[in-house]
Amino acid sequence: MTNQNVVLIPEEQQAAMKMAASKKKLNVINGGAKISSWVDSMRASSPPRISISPSLTEEEKSWALQHPSALSMFDKIVEASKGKKIVMFLDYDGTLSPIRFLKEEDQKAKMTTQKVVLIRKEQHAAMKMAASKKKLNVINGGAKISSWVDSMRASSPPRISISPSLTEEEKSWALQHPSALSMFDKIVEASKGKKIVMFLDYDGTLSPIVKNPERAFMSDAMRSTVKSLAQCFPTAIVSGRCRDKVYNFVQLAELYYAGSHGMDIKGPEKGSKYIKGDAKGILFQPAAKFLPMIDEVYKTLVYETKSTRGAMVEHNKFCLSVHYRCVDEKNWDLVAQQVKSVLKEYPKLKLTQGRKVLEIRPTIKWDKGKALEFLLKALGYANRRDVFSVYIGDDRTDEDAFKILKARGQGFGILVSKCPKDTSASYSLQEPTEVMTFLQKLVDWKLQTLRGQAML
Ligand SMILES: O=P(O)(O)OC[C@H]1O[C@H](O[C@H]2O[C@H](CO)[C@@H](O)[C@H](O)[C@H]2O)[C@H](O)[C@@H](O)[C@@H]1O
């Protein structure tokens, strides 16, 4: 197998492929088309739906107040029409018929209107890949893609929907991964009599995704909520970033931090109120011996990518991130080639993908899931049945932690996502503002429970 033929499947893409495999019953109308700009322009011309969960943002609430449902206002409407002749004008597409297919494909779509679903281009690419599987080369655990650019496009998928109504697929996903907000009572019920431990990813979970990784600040309101959370439950931040950097963003000394995708773990600065006699805090760095190699690769990558406008290499101590969010899409393959050519010389390093980022890290068997287990053990909670862990994250690397929780039956994961994704998480939240609401509800619930106990 020549290097040119070798392609790495991003975890994001693997997930999409799995989802695609479960979609055999659906027909795809833009099956033969390339990922191209018309999909983007269609996305732009069709606003995303407001919400797949019952909770609304402030903006959505205000819009809903200004444009209330005609169903809920029905009586007022007929009241207003009293004594008048009603004349009806109805638009067709999107009003009398659901918008489910593309005009260019009308012929095909007519035959299968009921089954047709317009899928986002990443899923489309994945389905195409699945179909042409045999032609592709295998790397990275058996998964395949036809090109790096496809896989890079697939990271950080945009919202799936183009119409206000949910597709069957979305409905089914939402049923399987209901909003953690709407299921709040069930969640706290399940945790009754158990010690709750909180694990929080940073980017895309506590802070919104922004173009410049150096400016991914969390809001003061989020910080204050996380602070209150840590007063109620042991709380850890588990991030792909280097520990110092994520600490600088969060700035809460009372938390546990696992940086570099869990390869750099430290307990609270002033010792943990949850571990008796642990004044200094734990420190675990399973990839310490890779530091010189990572430094060397960092310098080489900075050199190799410096002529590629928008590319940025981030040093995360035990791992590296090559960002391409700000690189013109036509140069994404160039970035991929630059990274691949450097990594050829370093078989002890592996490449994974996050949201518009290529991540380089040691091949050791350590990930966010292992970090979660390590922290539970450090807290003395490893084999206890009365521990209930909640892990909230938005990226593929968080899946390792979701899987561990599922396997241990010691809590569950919450995926932060606006669109359906293959996940081992049990619940979903759409964005960081919803994460904050959920965390605040947990704090309020805990304080209320304590007040109730104090009154007994
Ligand atoms: O595990 P996480 O805390 O979620 O870290 C994963 C990566 O997060 C950061 O990149 C992501 O967020 C940036 C800021 O919003 C965004 O610009 C970028 O496109 C995202 O991939 C961080 O900069 C990376 O080093 C982490 O690997």
Image: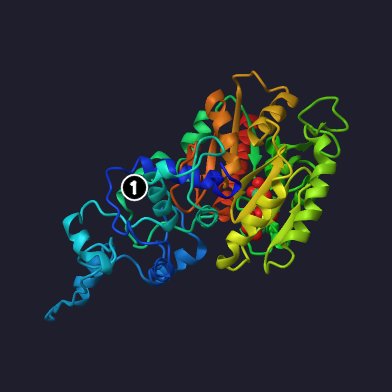
Alpha-carbon neighbours of circle 1 within 10 Å: few (<14), some, or many (≥20)?
some
| Residue at the image point whose x is 79% and y is 45% from the top | 294
Is residue 52 rendered to the left or right of residue 326? left
Is residue 128 rendered to the left or right of residue 114? right
Residue where numbered disc 1 is placed: 169
Most foreground residue, 29 or 228: 29
Q: Is residue 249 above or below residue 21?
A: below
Q: What element carries label 1?
A: helix
Q: Is residue 140 visible?
A: yes
Q: Which amino acid does label 1 sit on?
A: Glu
x, y percent for residue 27? 27, 50
Q: Is residue 348 above or below residue 152?
A: above
Q: In which quarter of the image is residue 346?
A: top right
Q: Is residue 365 above or below residue 6?
A: above
Is residue 37 rendered to the left or right of residue 373? left
Q: Quadrant of the N terminus?
A: top right
Q: Is residue 324 visible?
A: no
x, y percent for residue 347? 71, 39
